[in-house]
Image (spheres, rainbow, N blue to C red):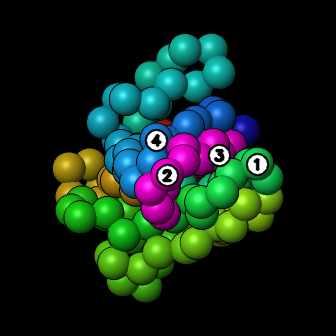
Amino acid sequence: PGTSSGNADLIFMDTRTLSASSTENLDLAGGALADPLGATLTFVTIKAIYVKAASANTNNVVVGGAGSNTLLGIFSDATDKIVVKPGGVFMWVAPATGATVTASTGDILLVANSSSGSSVTYDIVIIGTSA
């Protein structure tokens, strides 16, 4: 544990469900996320992101492409998106320097349901540092 190269001191884990055609903004520096013990998380860097779409989903889970304040460093452009098909996994890891989280201007990770008609469920793990 720690905040230097190859280390991390924060983790967010959850199983989440999005209704048909809906989106959610995960605010990585806004105090809306909590660790497994309930402590508020404010990430300064992200070292790893894991998203697994439930195999029972009909629609895809889409990661990235927030309308504003997009977390950069994972994607080459603020509009880039990753499509995670039912049963599929998206994993991004950068243990040395990670991706910088900038409060109020670069701290939103958008997750979306790709279509109408049914909800999607996904597991997410975000690992990073507080400094």
Q: Which residue is mark 3?
A: 122
CB-based contact (under 8 Å), mark 2 and mark 3:
no
- Give the class, few, some or many, for how many residues have Cα within 10 Å of label 1's Cα (few <14, many ≥20): few
**Three-letter amino acid code at the position of disc 3:** Tyr
User: How much space separates mark 4 and mark 1, taking CA atoms?
Assistant: 14 Å
Amino acid on which the number 4 mark rests in the picture: Ser
Q: Position of residue 65 (x, y in %)?
A: 36, 69
At 62% from the left and 14% from the top, the residue drawn is: 37
Is residue 124 visible in this depiction of the protein? no
Q: Residue at x 35, y 29 (%)?
A: 31
Q: Report the span colored magenta.
A: 112-126
Residue 121 part of the magenta segment: yes
Q: Quick check: 7 above or below 68? A: above
- Position of 41 relative to 50 (above/below): above
Which mark sits nearer the N-terminus, 3 or 1? 1
Q: Which residue is mark 1?
A: 56
**Quick one: label 2 or label 3, which is nearer the N terminus?**
2
Of circles 2 and 4, which is in front? Answer: 2
The residue wearing badge 4 is 19
Query: Hey, what amino acid is under mark 1?
Result: Ala
| N-terminal-most mark, 1 or 2 | 1
- Report the mark closest to the observer, 1 or 2: 2
Q: Mostly what secondary structure, the magenta segment?
A: strand
SS at mark 2 in the image = loop
**SS type, badge 1:** loop
Which residue in the protein does label 2 denote?
117
CA–CA distance in space, label 3 to label 1 = 10 Å
* 3D distance between C-alphas at marks 4 and 3: 12 Å
- The residue sitting at 68% across, 67% down in the picture is 85
